[in-house]
Image (tube, helix red, strand yellow):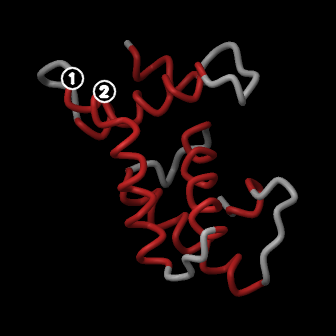
Amino acid sequence: MPITSFLNGVRFDRETTRIMGVAFEMTRVALGIAERRDDINEIVAKTIVELTKQGERNPDLLCERTLQSLREQYLTDIWSAPLGVDRRDAFQLAICRAWSSSNLTGLLYPSAECRRLAL
């Protein structure tokens, strides 16, 4: 899944876009969402875009800082997951909850994958 579909008119030079794409794929793999096509990808992409706007151009650091940013935003939900729930699923569920309740998205309902994780 290319990051370019999440740029929403923001323009970067070709090399910066390539670097962001590498960081996006690295982050998706680290989160275990590389095969998914849902709203979580947009949250990851927007975080990478914001970090890139701040001047970061190293894909390793973009990935690391994106993961750190997501951990800081969703850490409470991850560690409050019931026993037996995989931490990766808890992290993804926390992102789904935040995404579906965001005023910025205009979404009224979380994706099917978010609903599956909530069960």
Report the disc number at residue 80: 1
Q: Are marks 1 and 2 in contact (CB under 8 Å)?
A: yes
* Mark 2 nearby-residue class (10 Å; few <14, some 14–19, many ≥20): some
**Total numbered badges shown on the rendered structure:** 2
The residue where tag 2 is placed is 77
Q: From the viewer's perspective, is residue 60 above or below residue 75? A: below
Looking at the image, residue 101 sits to the left or right of residue 15; the answer is: left
Report the disc number at residue 34: none
Q: From the viewer's perspective, is residue 85 above or below residue 108? A: below
Q: Residue at x 36, y 59 (%)?
A: 30
What amino acid is found at the position of numbered circle 1 in the picture?
A: Ser
Q: Position of residue 91 (x, y in %)?
A: 35, 36
Q: Which element carries disc 1, helix, strand or loop?
A: loop
Residue farthest along the front direction in this orientation: 54
Which quarter of the figure is the C terminus placed in? Answer: top left
Where, by quadrant of the figure, is residue 80 drawn? top left
What amino acid is found at the position of numbered circle 2 in the picture?
A: Asp
Looking at the image, residue 39 sits to the left or right of residue 97; the answer is: right
Q: Position of residue 22 (x, y in %)?
A: 55, 74
Q: From the viewer's perspective, is residue 69 above or below residue 15? A: above
Q: Position of residue 29 (x, y in %)?
A: 41, 60
Q: CA distance from mark 1 to mark 2?
A: 5 Å
Q: Residue at x 57, y 22 (%)?
A: 112
Which quarter of the figure is the N terminus placed in? Answer: bottom right
Q: Position of residue 85 (x, y in %)?
A: 21, 26
Looking at the image, residue 105 sits to the left or right of residue 98; the answer is: right
Q: Nearer the viewer, residue 115 or 9?
A: 9
Residue farthest along the right direction in this orientation: 9
* Mark 1 nearby-residue class (10 Å; few <14, some 14–19, many ≥20): few
